[in-house]
Amino acid sequence: MRRLIGRVFESQGFRSAGLMTIGNISSTGLSAVAMIIFSRLLGPSDFGVFSVLFSLLLILSKLGDFGVNIAVQREIALNKSNSKLLVKMTQTGAYIKLIISLILALTGIFFSKWLSQNVLKVESSEMVMVVFILSSAVIFYEYINTILQAKGLFIWSVLSNFTQAIGKLLAAVLLSLYTLITVDLVVGLYLFMPLIGGMTGFFALPARLFTPKFDPASFKKIVGIAKWTSIAIVSATLADNLDVIIVQNYLSSYDTGLWSAAVRIASVASLVGWSLGTVLNVRVAAYKDQHNLDQYLKKAVFVSISSALLISVVAFFSNFAIKYTVGIEFLPAVTPLFLLLLSTALLTATSPFIALFYLFDKPAYFAISGLISSAILIFSDILLVPSLGVTGAGYARLITRLGVLLFTLYYARRGYLERYAKS
C-alpha cells in the first residue's frame, strides 16, 4: 500500500490533477464568496430568480458546446505533435460554435417571452433574451479552457478561471458598498466576467487559433465524436440545472433560492471530481498497453475512494457551511446541502473511471450516461419535490449520482474486457 501511495504522489498525472484541483477550488472559492455576497443582499426569493436565469445560462453554454469541446480536446490530446491539426481542429470548432451561438441568439429574440412565462416562471422576459444572446461569452470562455487543457497548459487554464472569479468577487464587493445589487445586474456580471477570463488564454494561445474556419476533415472527426458526447453533455447539464427550474415550478422563488444556495456551496466540492477528470481524460487517452492501464486502475481505485470519503466527511458540516456563508436566512437548506455533498462524493468517485472511455473509444458511454442521469433526476424530482420540497430535490440528486456510478463501473469493466480479453 505504501508503494502504491508513493507512485500516486510521484506521478505527473497526480501533480497535474493537484494543480487543477487546488487552482480551481481557489477560483471557485472566490466565486463562492461573490455568490455569498449576492445571495445575502438579494435574499432567498430574489436569489431564486437569479438562480433560474443562471441555470438557463449554464444550459445554454452546454448547448453551445454540443460535444465540440470533448471532441477537439480528444483529437489534440491524441495528436499533440501535429501543429497543423491543432489549428484546423480549433478553428473548425470555433466555426461550429459561432453557428450555434447565432441560433441561440435568434431563439432568445423570438421565444424569450413565452419561455419566461411558461417554463422559467420569471417576470423579466428581457433578461431571458439577454441571457440567450450573451451566452456566447460563456461558450467562448469554456472553449478556450478546453484548448488550454488539451495542450497540457493547466496553469493557464487555472489562471483563466481565476481571472473571471476574482472579477466577480471585486464587482460584488464594490456593488455591495453602494447597495446597487439587483438581479439584472448580477446576471449581467455573470455574462461578462467569463469573457474576461477567456481572453486571458490569449497570452498562452494565439488568437488566430480561434478564427472560425471550416475544414471538412476536422468537421467530420468532430461530428463523429460529438454525435455521442453532445447528447451526454446536454443531458448531464439538464440533470445538473433542470431541478432548479422544476423547484421553481412546483414550489416558490424562496424555495428555489434555498435549493440554489445549497447547490452553489456543494459546487465547490464538485471541483475535486471535475479537476481529476480534466487531467485524467487527457492522460489516459495516450495509454497504449494493458500494463500501463492496469497501473492506472490501481491508482484510480485509491483516488476514487479517498476523495469520495473526504467529501463525505465534509457533508457533516452542512449546518456550519450554511450559517457562515449564505447566512441564517438559508438554514432550511441544511438537509438538502448534506444530500448534495453526499451526491458529490459519488460523482467524484466516478471521475477516474470516466476517463477510461477516452482510451476505449466508447463515446456511446457519454450519451447513455447523460440520458440515464437526466431520466433518473427528472423522474425523481417530479416524484419527490411536490411532497418533500427541496429535500426531495436533494434525494433526487443522490439517487441520480448512484445510478451513474453503477452504470460507469459496469460499462468500464465491459470496455476493458472487450479490449484485453484476448491478451
Image (cartoon, grey):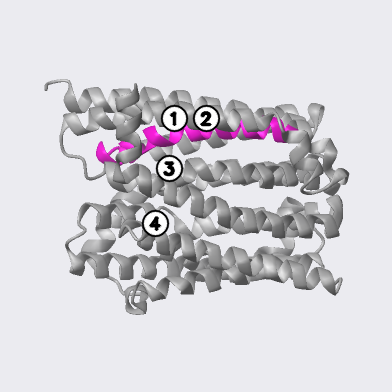
Amino acid bearing label 4: Asn
Say which residue label 1 marks: 304
- Please say if 335 is above or below 131: above
Q: Residue at x 58, y 45 (%)?
A: 238
Query: Residue 82 versus residue 92: which sits nearer the camera?
Result: 82
Tag 1 near tag 4, CB within 8 Å = no
Residue type marked 3 = Leu
Q: Label 4 near label 2: C-beta < 8 Å?
A: no
Q: Which residue is mark 3?
A: 276
Please state, as top left, top right, bottom left or bottom right, where the N terminus lies in the image: top left
Residue under numbered circle 4 = 69
> Between 321 and 231, which is closer to the camera in this rendering?
321
Residue situated in front as seen by the camera: 194 or 117: 194
Residue type at mark 2 is: Ala
Q: Residue at x 32, y 44 (%)?
A: 13
Numbered label attached to residue 246: none
Horizontal arrangement in the rendering, residue 199 relative to residue 255 (left or right) = left
Residue 288, image x and y in percent?
16, 39
Classify the position of the C terminus by image quarter: top left
Residue beneath the point at 55% across and 50% down: 25
In this picture, which residue range is highlighted in magenta? 336-364
How far separated are the C-alphas under marks 2 and 3?
12 Å
2 vs 4, front mark: 2
